[in-house]
Amino acid sequence: MNPPLGERFALLTDLYQLTMAACYFEEGMHEEATFSLFIRKYPPNRGYFVAAGLAEALTYLETLRFTPDDLAYLDSTRLFKTKFLDYLKTVRFTGQVHALPEGGIFFKDEPVLEVSAPIIEAQLAETFIINAVSLQTLIASKAARSTHVAQGRPLVDFGLRRTQGTDAGLKAARASYLAGFAGTSNVLAGKLYGLPTFGTMAHSYITSFPHEIDAFRVFARVFPQTATLLIDTYDNIPGARHAAKVAQEMAARGEKLGYVRLDSGDIAAISKEVRKILDDNGLDYVRILASGGFDEFKMAQVLEAGGLVDSFAVGTKMGVSADAPYFDCAYKLVKYGSRPVMKLSTGKVTLADKKQIYRFYDDRGRMAQDVIALRQEALPGGAPLLQKVMDRGRITAPLPTLQESREYFLSQFALLPEPYKALHDPPAYPVSLSPGLTDLQARLEQEIKQREAD
Amino acid sequence: MNPPLGERFALLTDLYQLTMAACYFEEGMHEEATFSLFIRKYPPNRGYFVAAGLAEALTYLETLRFTPDDLAYLDSTRLFKTKFLDYLKTVRFTGQVHALPEGGIFFKDEPVLEVSAPIIEAQLAETFIINAVSLQTLIASKAARSTHVAQGRPLVDFGLRRTQGTDAGLKAARASYLAGFAGTSNVLAGKLYGLPTFGTMAHSYITSFPHEIDAFRVFARVFPQTATLLIDTYDNIPGARHAAKVAQEMAARGEKLGYVRLDSGDIAAISKEVRKILDDNGLDYVRILASGGFDEFKMAQVLEAGGLVDSFAVGTKMGVSADAPYFDCAYKLVKYGSRPVMKLSTGKVTLADKKQIYRFYDDRGRMAQDVIALRQEALPGGAPLLQKVMDRGRITAPLPTLQESREYFLSQFALLPEPYKALHDPPAYPVSLSPGLTDLQARLEQEIKQREAD
């Protein structure tokens, strides 16, 4: 129904992509360029990333084209010559992509994706690809930390209302599911991605009734299978007693209340009181869901304080990755024609040429170290991580389903040793450069310094 | 071409909005409900908010409807009865909205928007409205701080590649322009919102040429009017000399180079060296643009250190509001039927009933204090800030253009006294409750505690 992604968003790019493209066009520069997408550094307390967003990036590349409307707009800016706009009309992405599958674990400086295509095509794709991969990787990396802390307790994404826009709301639901969440409150994400959806009730629902218990009774009657009663609107303890009463009324009808929900105050302490009220009323099967400012840090605190919480709703702080709301993610030219290239800007040196990541495992099958190598360099004993996922502008094999990517993430995450999953100041996972790449870097730096410092 | 906002995003909501709506429907609850949208607290270092996103919220409300496809999906969840889905098919937003115009300044606890409609309609709108208003308000509030620090230097939004998704990229461009920016690098935002677009060149562009100066020459030839030469790819100082040479070649052709761009290193120090190289070559008209991790804090540091920067590109940190990536923004029921309501959850007490904000100015016309009052309460001498912008589901008067909202912001921002604009720990702007609202809050709290604590 909607136009494909690459048509809707051909102009969702930085102006300079188009002006640079015009220069390449004028100069007749159409050789193959390779760009590497990687993250330059870890935000505080982070030691790994979870790859996500690849499917969106590839769909974009496969469908990229400028519509007549786009071209009319570009013409109206008076920046571009007709000949170049005529060329843009015919531009399609015809290149190759090598990438880490969604759900894979990677580390700083490692290329999570490499694009090789005629330079104009590869350059035009920059902004969208960074945007797509960095957002979902950001959220999946944050969500994985919650999955780790929750130790099997179901987690639900409640972030939509405060995610940064509509697209972020959808992508946060997808990426958190990929990283082990049980589902989302986001109905459209449920529809688009086939995710399980979950919901409770709002304080407004409670306050729209004269009495809290009336609100509970109505909900339990309309949704006896899925009701989760929110008990903190006025005061958790009377709220819990009202919920217990309604649960007993349900039990008398042969129904079982699923959950009560806590949303404010000292959750660890309150959960113990509420658990006791439920148990004292013969409701040991009623579980406790907690929400309200949760992320991996608050979840760990509540669980360490003995909180009796069976499930967490994780909202805003995961939905915007609040402690690290962006990654220092870059898409850099590493080869043009036959010439490997690099930049030397302070603090932003890039790794030249087409590359591969090799992963080495210890004798118990756990991740031990990675080596970033030249793509054609063989490193015996290492498992290559980047796969060719697009060739001549077409996705080479059906992409994994979201469910498959989620399982892949869980299987990979299990191989990452515990110390690297620490919530605070994890040690750096060992990543080194291969002999071939080390030599190339040294040689190029020397050459550039001689060439440009005149 | 696209379906209207309210059709595309009717399901972009939390599942509980629909389950609560089903309960209201079953109970025959169709009385008017009023919800208030407000921000509960300031993030660190913040003391004001800039209203934005209203146009999007109203457009959504005006076009809200569930498509047959949406209803088929809801049916497939087996949660809802046919009678309720039949009702949803016909639901339209038929209510009223009172709001602060875009570009207006507001403070914590103040309702920036109030929706009054039959409870199902007002409830269904919650998630989208919070999402729309909170994102743009977040970015406009952050961007205003940069506008303040830049003191007239043109600022350009370069955030797109790392904004949290495509929608955020567009909204960041719009909201930062509203808050005084000169334009954006985002071409689609330029097209959709009529924004001025700006661009420079990337390191990849430089490295795709054998020599930096060749890359400069080509760009200057293709874009003599708008070229901005990026000089830090290998080393700023030789880069500046190469740019100066190309600028002189341009001058010989009767052309004037506009800008050079610095993107890494100690910008204050480098800008002085580069300024000297330019001036020594008779290029005092060539200006310096700085980019690379800028926000209001870094801009202030560079300017305090005497940096000779004429324009800043502000990217990721503004685009995701990195130091405060979300606001604690809530949409709370304040009245149902004739009954004002509130919640008492720990730390989250709401202000009951339909409200108005009155602003009082000092004798020099500057903002002095605000009073939050009941909507029908008259406060002599205070200017009412909330306007009726939607009635019976229709926008009451043509919305201001983005340009008009930008001018409105600039005029209002000029009335906010300097101390409240401090980058660090600004004092709290005085906001109090009117006598009528104070009385109502006390009375309601008393009533609820008696009613629910049984």
Image: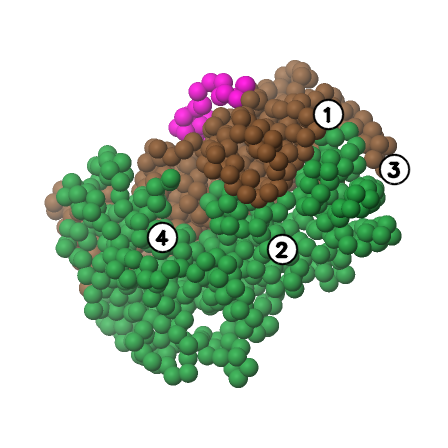
Chain colours: A brown, B green
Which chain letter matches label 4?
B
Residue A303 lies left or right of residue B449; in this view the side is right
- For the C terminus of chain A, the image quarter is top right
The boundaries of the magenta stretch are A389-411
Q: Residue at x 27, y 36 (%)?
A: B69
Residue B427 visible within the image: no
Mark 1 residue element? strand
Q: Residue at x 33, y 66 (%)?
A: B388
> Do marks 4 and 3 both belong to one polypeptide chain?
no
* Image location (x, y in percent) of residue B143: 56, 57
> Magenta segment: does it hold A136?
no
Would you name the residue on which mark 1 appears?
A340
Which chain letter matches label 3?
A
> How many angstroms separate mark 1 from mark 2 (CA)?
35 Å
Would you name the residue on which mark 4 appears?
B59
Would you name the residue on which mark 2 appears?
B155
